[in-house]
Amino acid sequence: MRWWTVANFVSNAGTWMQLTVQNLLVLQITGSAAATGLSVSIQMAPGLLLGLTGGAAVDRWPLKLTAAVSQALLGVVALVTAVLVALGRLDLPVLLALAAVTGLIATVDGPACSLLGNDLVRAPDVPSAIGVGSLVHSAGRLAGAALAGVAVGFLGTAAAYAANGLSFVFVACVIPFLKAARPSEATHRVVPAPAPAAPPTPEAVTARSMSAREGLAFFMRRPRLVALAALNGVSALFGRNYSLTLVVLVTGPLAGDAGSFSKVSTVLAVGGIIGAVLGARLRTPSVRVVAALTLAGALLQVLAGLAPSLLVLLVLVLPMAVAESVGDTAQSTVLQTDPPAYMRGRVLGAWSSIRTVWGLAAPPMLGLCMELAGVRATLITGGLVIAAFVTTGYLLKGRSPRSGALIPMTEAALPARARLSTAA
């Protein structure tokens, strides 16, 4: 797990180095903000269209091999991009094609790497492992953004892509040496064919033959997973996009500049790190925990919309980021531990597709709202809508005791249709 954490930090730092300069590169090539947005959309599109298929592939293929190959392929794409940038051969069609390939590989890489990290620790430590992953993500974001400025300043834009490519290769080299702490769960993900002497059981056939579409059906039959998707969607559409809403608030009503927003971004990153540390201490996170943190973030967003000065906003931004980070950690824990082991790739694939919908829809909707009603009204109204949604859901579900509790899914607790054949 220590090796995996180091590898993840290196990979996250490389990824954020590339992301820091990627939009600037598109602008340099095209001079068009629309083309920049198009490149982002094309990279996200495979997650929307093929997220379920990628998750199904993760459930069917050996986990370590899948993660190592996907990391190596992402490294190749980044290194090819670096060479094209260095030679001055990168034009818009090639860049968009590379973005689409990156997004396609990510539909498999995302769930594979998430589940691989969970197998490296004992079951009771999975929430802590996910919290450590969130911490590494936040720390890598800070380090990557700082290193990108240094690399580009001394070596040029291609250096950021090259560094990201090498970081993927490093992770791919580490994966074969990792040892699972729970090999029994890891082997359950790939359901082998039964021995010739024994006919296949209905349970084994069901588990082996489930398609990506049936994986989505499983997701929709789980009330807590549907509740998480609803919470995530409302939060994305009416809040959480702080890099968009807060930059307008700082440079508009608060009369700040780029340096002022840089301070806000730094506080957001620090809050994310604090939240990841706190999230790692959650032993049994539940949907209700996610809902409570979503409600807290919404109320803080309302106060941020009323902030009279940059100093007051900075005071509010820190707990906003903490609530968001802890909520994300709790959400990831539920998503990765609630389904049975052989379904987790498909559940994460379904989640990727659903989250991509919110990710594509939220920025233009928030931008239109800020254009028509102003940023303060958008923040205040959005926070109140989220708070009303969470409160209504709590009142409607309050009659069902422990409806949001996270109940460990053991094989004995699964219905016969979903159980795996241990004989297989």
Image: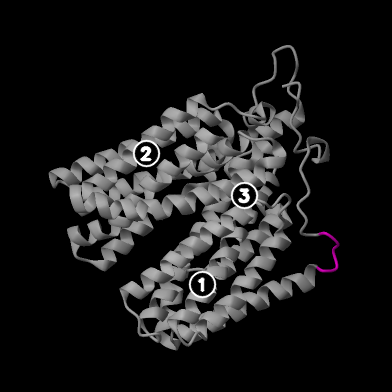
Residue 206 in percent (x, y) is at 70, 34
Relative depth, front residue between 59 and 14: 14
Residue 402 in the figure: left or right of residue 205: right
Q: Quadrant of residue 215?
A: top right
* Comes first in the chain, label 1 or label 2: 2
Q: Residue furthest left?
A: 88
* Comes first in the chain, label 2 or label 3: 2
Residue 311 in percent (x, y) is at 46, 80
User: Up-down: is 403 above or below 88?
Assistant: below
What secondary structure is marked by label 1?
Answer: helix
Q: Identify the mark at residue 167; answer none if there is no mark.
A: 2
Number of labels in the image equals 3
Residue 247 painted magenta: no
Per the rendered image, the range of residues in magenta is 398-402
Residue 75 in percent (x, y) is at 34, 37
| Type of amino acid under label 1 | Val
Q: Identify the mark at residue 317; answer none if there is no mark.
A: 1
- Quadrant the N terminus occupies: top right
Q: Quadrant of residue 56?
A: top right
| Type of amino acid under label 2 | Ser
Query: Label 3 vs label 1: CA separation?
Result: 36 Å
Q: Give me the residue at 72% from left, 75% from top.
A: 391
Query: Label 1 vs label 2: CA separation?
Result: 31 Å
Residue 348 in the figure: left or right of residue 7: right
Q: Which residue is mark 3?
A: 216
User: Up-down: is 309 above or below 228?
Assistant: below
Task: State whether the magenta stretch is mostly helix, strand or loop.
Answer: loop
The label nearer to you, 3 versus 1, is: 1
Residue 242 in percent (x, y) is at 46, 70
Q: Give me the residue at 31% from left, 36% from top.
A: 76
